[in-house]
Image (cartoon, helix red, strand yellow):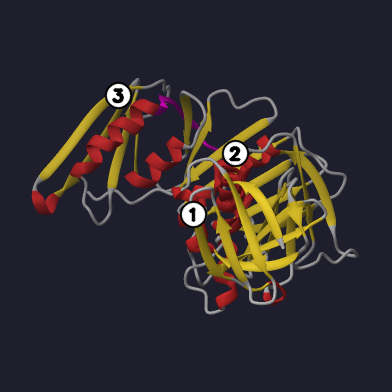
Amino acid sequence: MKFVVSSSELLYHLQAVSRVVSNKSTIPILENILFELGEGKLTITASDLESTMVTSMALDNIEGDGTIALPAKILLETLKKFPEQPITFDIAMDTKKVDIITDKGKFSVIGLDGDEFPEIPSIDADKASRLQVPASLALSGINKTLFATADDELRPVMNGILIEMSPENLTFVASDSHKLVRYQRTDATTEFTSSFILPKKPASFLKNVLVKEDGDISIEFDDKNAFFQMENHQLVCRLVEGNYPSYNAVIPQDNPNKIIINRQEVVNSLGRVSLFSNQASNLVKLSIDGDDLMVSAQDIDFSISAYEKLSCQYDGEPIEIGFKSAFLAELLDNISSEDVVMELADPARAGIFLPVDNEGPEDELMLLMPMMINA
């Protein structure tokens, strides 16, 4: 089996799938990448059993066909050192010896039998649902919610993004119990109502690939797996089993206090003032009175404190509320508007954060639980 390929093109495809490869796998074959040659193309696959990424590239110079698994780490590190050039893979299928030949040298490795590589799981046709969405829309949904997923071994359903489909909208939801993000698109609908929980790890794989994808992606899923088919890549992943909590129940509906703030001004202020907060709690206090927003923090143990006054738009009774600074800054960083509406009911209820212009096909809502303000 033999083929010639561009070193930079091969590196691009290998990097796309290599994020799936686990360096700590107890199954040796999973530290390898599967090469499958046939029908005028090279198909490259990586898997950690939970997720499988597949990509393919058309080749002109091919001899023979077959499969072989090659060590991911040495292959990637070698290709990174190559300048752009054609390289030849000469594979002896009987001994599994692979010679990587350039115009200046030869690099030899021993591969593994490709038949040992785990098979891609299949979708149960009787339980399958399908939809098609623009790659840019799927990327936005993941970008808006991935940061809010949890790392909770006791509640694995929180460790992923809930994706809900309905005739009204497509909704992405993530929460770690401290913060919650709901991102809805009314320009992506389905004739059916369904949902699945996309785990955090494959969601991050998908995010990296979607950046370079144009057009639509096809999503097919049943109660166990989901297939994401793109122009040049395919991601197959095992879904999180279980029922996602009723997130709408925790979103406060009556919030009489609405404050408009400049997002970047508050983020910058939090970066400065939070340096003076208690390291354990990272508590910052927001005090709103008229058109003044005061951001303050203190650490009584070290006798340090700081405050800054910012301008805002507010017409209501004075109110004070505490938040974990890191969570608040992260949440504001992920809102896509210059000005943000902060909706508050009282210091003990969650704060709602919305873009000022929250109309059209996009509906963004972020929620942050407050912290008790020490007297």
On screen, residue 63 above or below 47: above
x 59%, y 35%: residue: 364
Magenta-drawn stretch contains 369: no
280 relative to 223 in the view: left or right:
left
- Tag 1 residue: 105
Q: In which quadrant will I find the N terminus?
A: bottom right
Q: How far apart are the two marked residues, 1 and 3, measured between alpha carbons?
A: 64 Å
Residue 351 coordinates in the image, percent (x, y): 46, 41
Labels 1 & 3 near each other (Cβ < 8 A): no
Q: How far apart are the two marked residues, 1 and 2, measured between alpha carbons?
A: 35 Å
- Tag 3 residue: 310
Q: Amino acid at mark 1?
A: Gly
Q: Quadrant of the rendered structure where residue 183 is?
A: top right
Residue 282 coordinates in the image, percent (x, y): 28, 50
Crowd tier of the residue under label 3, counting other residues whose Cα lies within 10 Å: few below 14, some 14–19, many 20 or above: some
Number of marks: 3
Looking at the image, tell me whether mark 1 or mark 2 is earlier in sequence order: 1
On screen, residue 69 above or below 304: below
